[in-house]
Amino acid sequence: MISNKAGLISIFAKIYLILILSIFSIIQFNITAASKPFKSKNGMVVSANKIASKVGVEILKAGGNAVDAAVAVGFALAVTYPYAGNIGGGGFMVIHLQEGNNTTIDFRERAPFTAYRDMYLDKYGNVIENMSLEGAASVGVPGSVSGLIYALERYGTMKLSKVIQPAIDLADNGWTLESQDAESFYKFLEVFSKYPSSLRIFTNNGVPYKEGDLFKQPELAWTLKQIRDRGLDGFYKGKVSDLFVQQMMDMGGFITHADLEKYEPVEREPIIGSYREYKIISMAPPSSGGIALIQLLNILENFNFEKDEWGSSQYLHRIVEAMKYVFVDRTYHLGDADFYPVPIDDLISKEYAKTIFERIKDNAVPSAEIFTGDSLRYYESTETTHYSVYDNLGNAVSVTTTLNSAFGSKVVVEGAGFLLNNEMNDFSEKPGVSNQFGLLGTDANAIEPGKRMLSSMTPTIVLKDNKPYLILGSPGGSMIITTVLQVLMNCIDFNMNIQEAVDMPRIHHQWMPDKIYFEKFAINKDAMENLVKMGYDFSDMNDRITTIGLVQGIMIDQNNKIIYGASDSRGNGSAEGF
Ligand code: GLY
């Protein structure tokens, strides 16, 4: 049956190929000095998916607060943005409450209890290709359902049945696929065809979906109803968990009933820093995002950037050098702080940043001289999603959530209709080997039972006079951190409105490989020539991606009580408000 379907798909493949190639080769963003954000007075939701943004605004209109709306958006994204929205993944929520306090909820996936350090290595100690990237063995214990329910119960005002219902209706009644949805399913059909439960969901009886088709997900609706009616037990115990564990047993996965039953989100103190007169609230480990962002800002605060300096070689040189130092620290010191002693206070201290600032001179310092090491690669994927919410009471919520890769492990739980993450790939599969000096830095992110894998997700809230000024975040693996940095600086240092700040082209450097990644238009000819003279090397991005990040941001003008929303023009999301 599968091979028949695969045959059909290959016929359709030929028909669609030219269309798809032409669409995916287009760089999707527009840069326009006249980019205008969406404006509202009473509340705003910005996400990578229009339907989900609208769901969030309806909750705000019905009297829900920003947390109620965020939880509704989280469940809706699992239905309308299966590429990254999820109930089978994890994420982080940063909250600023109207009373002025800040908190975060960590619902990152965990390693199963039977996981062990070398689980992805063969008998010769080599990484087994793809094992942590695809299929049941790559799945971490999902935290999203637990995190969303925790947030709602602790900080929301509405019942779970109310905020989850829009997602159930969308799954039951279906929603109309736009071209990008059909294309994203199509792009992964070959890999879905390895997993019958996934192929069945993401094809229309074996035929690729196309723009305009109604996409119904009755099995996912059933799972969401289990959650609606039984709360946590509807997902982590009972029938859904039985199907989940069965899938693991059938396909060589590690997750057991005990893993699911014992999963718990953690409410953590945020990482707090400052940049000029602004306060930065971001995510603590197991995300590296908050620490890395604040480290970068601490270093860059020592420079004064003129308004017209944006895009100059001097500006790019300074931010790139800062990125290199911060990514060295990320590599060697960051992991789940519940398992590894992350030197958080040292890393985010202004004094430490000053020592790095003093090392930034006129030319590029080769990465190998900053810290000699092997060419360590980050295996984090770029497919994650962010959403930002603000309500008329002054509550701000910033959520980044992920299945890791696009469509995660590519495995849909048979009978339960939801995709599973492949987050185990965010661990260091083989710690220590990249450092020729034998430093055990990457042990920070080694696999251990129950440990959370290191993330780069950087859901962030920026306060001005202790009131929300920016709410932002992005997908993009290691590029999340540098994306959030640049958008934030675009607003604060270069006085851009939030849409301009989000849309401007971006660059990225992560220490190793020693290259500047850059989007089209990010580096003009003069700047490029100067940077080459300073000693920089560049990636043409063709080997990896064409865009950096996909930001969903909100800027609040507290004086005039105006909320501005901006969904990145690189994508197809929307800012919705009222
Ligand atoms: N999976 C991407 C991240 O957590 O950073």
Image (cartoon, rainbow, N blue to C red):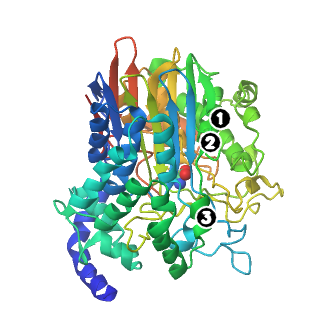
Q: Mark 3 to mark 1: distance in Å?
A: 50 Å
Pointers 2 and 1 in contact (C-beta within 8 Å): yes
Secondary structure state at the residue bearing disc 3: helix
At 71% from the left edge and 62% from the top edge, which residue is drawn?
Answer: 448
Amino acid type of the residue tagged 2 in the rendering: Gly
Image-based side of 44 in relation to 248, left or right: left
Amino acid type of the residue tagged 1 in the rendering: Asn
Viewer-proximal residue among 508 and 527? 508
Viewer-proximal residue among 318 and 170? 170
Secondary structure state at the residue bearing disc 2: loop
At 72% from the left edge and 58% from the top edge, which residue is drawn?
Answer: 374
Viewer-proximal residue among 426 and 525? 426
Closer to the N terminus: mark 2 or mark 1?
1
Image-based side of 563 in relation to 429, left or right: left
Closer to the N terminus: mark 3 or mark 1?
3
Q: Residues within 10 Å of mark 2 (few under 14, many from 20)?
A: few
For label 2, the residue is 535
Question: Can the viewer see residue 496 in this picture?
Answer: no
Task: Kindly tell me whether mark 2's CB lies below 8 Å from ligand 1.
Answer: no
Q: Position of residue 449 (x, y in %)?
A: 70, 63
Question: Can the viewer see residue 234 in this picture?
Answer: yes
Secondary structure state at the residue bearing disc 1: loop
Q: Residue furthest left?
A: 212
For label 1, the residue is 363
Q: Residues within 10 Å of mark 1 (few under 14, many from 20)?
A: some
At 51% from the left edge and 61% from the top edge, which residue is drawn?
Answer: 236
